[in-house]
Amino acid sequence: MRLFIFMGLLLASFGAFADSAGRKPLAVVAITAQQKQIHDDVIAVRGRYKDMPSSKRVDLLAKQAGLMAMLEGKTTTDELSESEQTEAFNTLEWIEAAINNAEDERMVCRREKVLGSTRLTRVCRTVEEERRMKELARDQLDRGDAQMRR
């Protein structure tokens, strides 16, 4: 239980940092310590990981390896580029969602151009919100096609 409280605080801190350059960057040591604990538990197939399907455990370990490679040699998240910060945030969110079986609640961030500008901004939505937006856009396109055929 203590691990997941720590994990929630860690992700909240990272998310807050990722959205505002004025906030204190997160120490990579905290992220790596948390991920090592999760890694050890996944490898040992103990705790909440004992019932996790092996394919999901493999995916989780692969995501962790990518994250650790990205963070290697860094002391804070401030040393990552904006795209790497987004990727690290998305990876941490994926890991949390996999552990908690909460895929629809997982936050996904991307950098999108502001309409009429070349400026990029960070946009974060849950997987469920993304799915609803895609369905709405698809419905609007379908209605437009139906109206054009008349």
Image: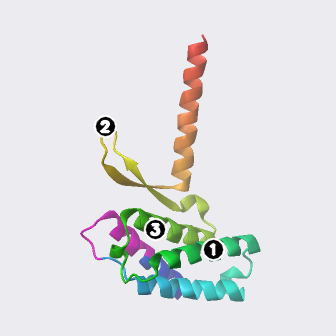
* Residue wearing tag 3: 89
Q: Kindly report the distance in space between the C-alpha atoms of the residues bearing marks 3 and 1.
A: 15 Å
Q: Kindly report the distance in space between the C-alpha atoms of the residues bearing marks 2 and 3.
A: 27 Å
Amino acid type, residue under disc 1 in the picture? Ala
Amino acid type, residue under disc 3 in the picture? Phe
* Residue wearing tag 2: 116
| Quarter of the picture holding the N terminus | bottom right
Which is more N-terminal, label 3 or label 2? 3
Residue 58: percent from the left, percent from the top?
70, 74
Residue 109: percent from the left, percent from the top?
45, 58
Residue 137: percent from the left, percent from the top?
53, 35
Q: Quadrant of residue 144?
A: top right
* Residue wearing tag 1: 62
Q: Which range is magenta? A: 11-24
User: Considering depth in this image, is 90 or 137 the residue closer to the camera?
Assistant: 90
- State the residue at coordinates (54%, 37%): 136
Residue 95: percent from the left, percent from the top?
57, 72
